[in-house]
Amino acid sequence: MAPSRSPLNRQSIAAAMTELLGSHAIETDDEQLKAASVDRFRKYTAVHGIYDGPIPAAIVYPSSTADVAAILRFAEENLVNVVPRTGRTATEGGLETVVEDSLVVDGSRMNAILSIDSVDMMATVQCGVGLQELEDLLRAQGLTTGHSPQSKPLAQLGGLVATRSIGQFSTLYGGIEDMVVGLEAVFPGGQVTRIKNVPRRAAGPDIRHIVIGSEGALCFITEVTVKLFRYRPENNRYFGFLVQDFGNGIDALRELITAGYRPSVCRVYSPEDARQHFAGFYQGKNVVVFVAEGPKGIVEATAEAIEEVFAGRPHQRVDSGLIQHWFENLNWGQDKIDAEQAAMLEHAHLGYTTEVSVNWSQVSGLFDAVMARIRGEFPRAADLTMLGAHSSHSYQTGTNLYFVYDYTINCSPREEIEVYHKPLNAIIVTEALRLGGSMVHHHGVGKYRTPWVKQEHGSAYYLLSTLKHAFDPHGVMNAGTIFPLDPG
Ligand SMILES: Cc1cc2nc3c(=O)[nH]c(=O)nc-3n(C[C@H](O)[C@H](O)[C@H](O)COP(=O)(O)OP(=O)(O)OC[C@H]3O[C@@H](n4cnc5c(N)ncnc54)[C@H](O)[C@@H]3O)c2cc1C
């Protein structure tokens, strides 16, 4: 939490925005402002109507790049903290308005699909285009972005790029960083920057990466161009296996991936995690899941390799129809969020996740260490109703582990984050760092992993902090996100 550095009070900030963009573009309703002060990191307190942090001065809805430039110029001149947002599915506090009288800049009305080019295989959209809407349109034309995060029904392109998001088909298509061809962003002071769309270039460092993953802490993304691929669902093949040992499942992924195969989906669920997805058939075992997709010949070769990897391992086969059915119902739209909120109000019970990554040689060690530390040292271990993990995104050199934990809350709603979520998150993050991994695989640093950001980057933190000083010298972009509020 930080005081405002602006000479303007909240009423003057809202009035200035109304003058700049018109009253249709400004929201100052109290309930909306409270909801805009948090994201899903505080989903439990929010559902109980508890908003302890600073409440923003206004939410502003730009409708063009010029509007965004005008807002950022005003914000820098008047030292007003800006929190960009689009789909509002952030999970790590990236949307929290920790500075008093912040401006939330919501890009969701910038929602035009500008072009779909099936010759150069790219689509250009404004930041507020929902991924689901874009995908639906593309698939009807036999195309796809290949991006399919679980939040696809809600997340929008600006936020997806800003968080370095990754989708369920990542082993084949990569993360968003592999998909973005070019983009447009507005920097503090109103500087508009467009990075052109070329297949590759060697004209200096790849400047797209200054923007991708910047979490609203450097600039506001206004337009994105992503690659397109052919959509061929008729070729998809689904596979499921039960294995006794988590490490053995991970080893199967490693063998397949390092041999050069790229099934689009490639996952291992620990038994505790598998219980919530595959209760009907997991039999208390680890579940390994694959989807092979793409041109027929590639799918067949991948399928053959999957069979070979499992031929040499003790396993039980899962009917592929069950895996396909599970997979087709995995995404989270507003209906699941509403159901979760109702359940949170009814029962003092909650689930969270922390996702990290490590090299292949450290995966089993990380899994075992986290399980042992949480069960052994977490003072509220008896309140855990589920503790498990899955690997869902694999690479030539390693994979991610996505830890999942549910607990019954035996404290006041206000204390929940300090008593449960933060200590559990801290154990997972510190174990990943201890084993040489990354403390965050895809949800972003937000505001809650900043205590470890210097440890994450080591001597390379110099590069990251220099970007912040260079592009946001007055510190008006999403203060407290990626970079600690108090740099120490
Ligand atoms: C149920 C659920 C499932 C999820 N599944 C996945 C998953 O499979 N893979 C994954 O990677 N993530 C997942 N997430 C996390 C989240 O959905 C993604 O990180 C997504 O990319 C956020 O997009 P958004 O449009 O909702 O952004 P928001 O929540 O609005 O914002 C996210 C961050 O980006 C910044 N930001 C937003 N828009 C802009 C902009 N135009 N310019 C600059 N900065 C901006 C914000 O300040 C914030 O820090 C999931 C979240 C939920 C709730």
Image: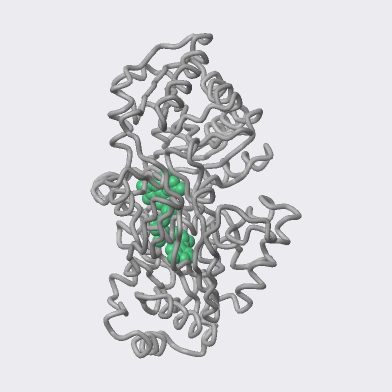
Up-down: is 368 above or below 353? above
Which quarter of the rendered image does ligand 1 occupy? Answer: bottom left
Q: Residue 404 placed where, x, y %?
A: 44, 37
Q: Quadrant of the C terminus?
A: bottom right
**Where on the picture, by quarter, is residue 255?**
top right
Looking at the image, the residue that sits furthest to the right is: 459
Which residue is found at the position 27% from the left and 76% from the top? 29
Whether residue 24 is visible to the viewer of this picture, yes or no, is: yes
Q: Residue 247 placed where, x, y %?
A: 56, 21
Up-down: is 361 above or below 335? above
**Where on the picture, by quarter, is residue 272?**
top left
Q: Is residue 233 left or right of residue 361?
A: left
Q: Residue 50 placed where, x, y %?
A: 34, 63
- Foreground pick, 299 / 466: 299
Total marks shown come to 0
Looking at the image, the residue that sits furthest to the front is: 119
Which residue is found at the position 42% from the left and 48% from the top? 228
- Foreground pick, 83 / 8: 83
Which residue is found at the position 43% from the left and 61% from the top? 158
Which residue is found at the position 59% from the left and 46% from the top? 439
Q: Residue 389 placed where, x, y %?
A: 48, 32
Up-down: is 37 above or below 423? below
